[in-house]
Image (cartoon, rainbow, N blue to C red):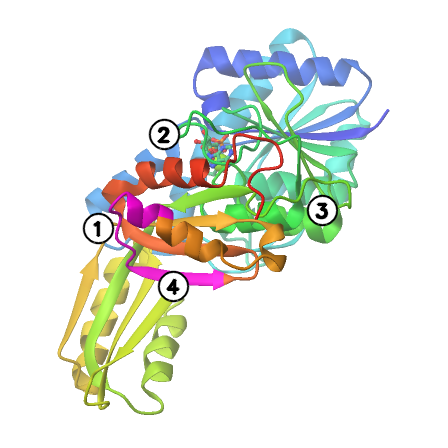
């Protein structure tokens, strides 16, 4: 008899029929004698609708109120799932963030988990009940509702599994595991039996939304065994775990993409010490994360153009801030482009192989896909390209690095 945490994403609880299906799965786990804590997302499309509702009212909704609003999605699905489980005849109880003391910091809309009241949860589990926890939400020390960023229910689940010292954290979703790339846009994508925390972390942070990045950080930190599976079909799924020497370590193990970044360029700022610091400090003070950055110095050596990417949700705020700042710095103009996408190749094997980036650029070039920005680390290479070529680029790179074959490409 162990403790199992199961998380069901939006599509898995997207209709009453699907909620009934989830209830059956949860109950069969409980019948095995395990203590079961379930984490649910909002029904599919619900969080988007709530955000749209707020944006229809005001341009930039107050983040505190936004969290009060969007957290309701998970309140609905947790109550419905608890009802469906009880209907089968098994005791269950819905629990909101505040009821399990899921404490976060005050960063509304992207809060971080600080603590969980394990005693409150264990009381429910020890009473033989299934705990149905509303994912994505938490509460500050002051009692304000917070949310954990888009896709945050994954993080609720892994954090719960860590706090409960659960045997496993099962993430049930609409695909049957983690693939070499998004199986919905590349039919040759291959399911991985095992993926290391580090590779999954890189894939997630580069856009593979199958797991929220922070959930993988948590899993790695607390050594939580995460199993990604389909809600709709049986199968082995993908185990996310510590790297071991037997794991396949191809040069490129996956391709990730992110359509949620936008490019901003500040043209012709003076090329002198302190300018970059002024620009990026203002952005970070406004809690805007910057990703890829390039700077070109003009031929006269006195001016520079700076381009970088920010999340699309921060785009309007960043443009407004930089138009102001640009004036005081003497910039010629500030331009924005939301038609970009970032495509990345990821692989621990890249550490020891030269020429992988060149091969990526050549494969994109052959298809006439222009590279607008580049960034690299020892286990990834990312390029910003025109959004309209994204799907083609994913398929081209998947072929180039032979990701449909176990072992992938060799040097
Ligand atoms: P949920 O609502 O269950 O949390 P998400 O939509 O957040 O589900 O995540 C699942 C989706 O992630 C899949 O439908 C798939 O399109 C996408 N995805 C992106 N990259 C990958 C990948 N490498 N492996 C599997 N799925 C991926
Ligand atoms: N409902 C939230 C979202 O759509 C959280 C989640 O699904 O994990 O982002
Ligand atoms: Mg998700």
Residue 31, horizontal then vertical, whole percent: 77, 13
In the structure shown, which secondary structural element does the residue marked by tag 4 occupy?
strand
Who is closer to the viewer here, 320 or 217? 217
* Marked residue nearer the N-terminal end (2 or 1): 2
Residue 307 position (above or below residue 343): below
- The answer to whether marks 2 and 1 mark residues whose Cβ atoms lie closer than 8 Å is no
- Residue that protrudes farthest toward the front in the picture: 411
Secondary structure under the numbered disc 2 in the rendered image? loop
* Tags 4 and 2 touching, CB below 8 Å: no
Q: Which mark is first along the chain, 1 or 4?
A: 1
Tell me the CA gap for discs 4 and 2. Answer: 30 Å
In the image as oriented, which residue stretches furthest toward the left? Answer: 332
Where residue 41 appears, as percent x and y from the top left, is 50, 32
Would residue 264 be counted in the magenta stretch?
Answer: no
Label 4 or label 3, whichever lies nearer to me, is 4
Residue 45: numbered disc: 2
Q: Residue 52: in sight, yes or no?
A: yes
Q: Which residue is mark 4?
A: 292
Quadrant of the image occupied by residue 226: top right
Q: Are marks 4 and 3 in contact (CB under 8 Å)?
A: no
Q: Earlier in the sequence, mark 3 or mark 1?
A: 1
Give the mark nearer the N terminus: 4 vs 3. 3
Residue 117: mark in rendering: 3
In the image, residue 130 above or below residue 178:
above
Image quarter of residue 39: top right
> What's the distance in space between the residues labelled 4 and 1, CA to CA?
30 Å
Which residue carries the number 1 mark?
58
Marks 3/1: CA distance? Answer: 36 Å
Coordinates of residue 404 in the picture (x, y in percent) = 52, 30
Range covered by the magenta-colored residues:
363-376
């Amino acid at each position: 008899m162990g403790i199992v945490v199961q998380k069901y994403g939006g599509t898995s609880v997207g209709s009453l029929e699907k909620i009934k299906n989830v209830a059956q799965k949860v109950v069969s786990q409980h019948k095995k004698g395990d203590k079961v804590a379930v984490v649910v997302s909002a029904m599919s499309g619900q969080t988007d609708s709530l955000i749209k509702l707020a944006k229809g009212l005001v341009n930039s909704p107050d983040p505190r109120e936004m969290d009060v609003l969007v957290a309701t999605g998970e309140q609905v699905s947790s109550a419905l799932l608890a009802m469906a489980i009880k209907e089968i005849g098994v005791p269950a109880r819905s629990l909101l963030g505040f009821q399990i003391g899921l404490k976060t910091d005050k960063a509304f809309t992207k809060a971080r988990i600080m603590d969980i009241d394990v005693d409150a949860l264990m009381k429910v589990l020890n009473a033989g009940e299934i705990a149905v926890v509303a994912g994505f939400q938490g509460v500050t020390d002051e009692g304000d509702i917070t949310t954990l960023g888009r896709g945050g229910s994954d993080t609720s689940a892994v954090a719960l599994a860590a706090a409960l010292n659960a045997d496993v954290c099962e993430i049930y979703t609409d695909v049957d595991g983690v693939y070499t790339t998004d199986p919905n846009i590349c039919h040759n994508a291959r399911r991985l039996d095992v993926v290391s925390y580090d590779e999954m972390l890189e894939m997630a942070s580069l856009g593979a939304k199958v797991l929220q990045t922070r959930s993988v950080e948590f899993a790695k930190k607390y050594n939580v065994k995460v199993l990604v599976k389909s809600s709709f079909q049986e199968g082995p799924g993908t185990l996310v775990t510590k790297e071991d020497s037997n794991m396949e370590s191809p040069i490129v193990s996956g391709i990730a993409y992110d359509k949620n970044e936008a490019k901003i360029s500040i043209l012709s700022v003076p090329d002198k010490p302190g300018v970059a610091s002024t620009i990026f400090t203002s952005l970070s003070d406004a809690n805007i994360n910057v990703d890829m950055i390039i700077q070109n110095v003009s031929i006269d050596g006195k001016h520079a153009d700076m381009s970088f990417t920010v999340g699309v949700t921060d785009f309007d705020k960043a443009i407004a801030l930089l138009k102001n700042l640009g004036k005081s710095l003497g910039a010629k103009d500030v331009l924005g482009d939301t038609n970009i996408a970032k495509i990345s190749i990821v692989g621990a094997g890249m550490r020891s192989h030269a020429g992988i980036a060149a091969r990526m650029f050549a494969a994109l070039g052959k298809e006439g896909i222009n590279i607008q920005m580049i960034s690299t680390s020892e286990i990834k290479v990312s390029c910003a390209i025109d959004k309209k070529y994204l799907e083609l680029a994913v398929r081209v790179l998947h072929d180039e690095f032979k990701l449909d074959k176990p072992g992938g490409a060799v040097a």
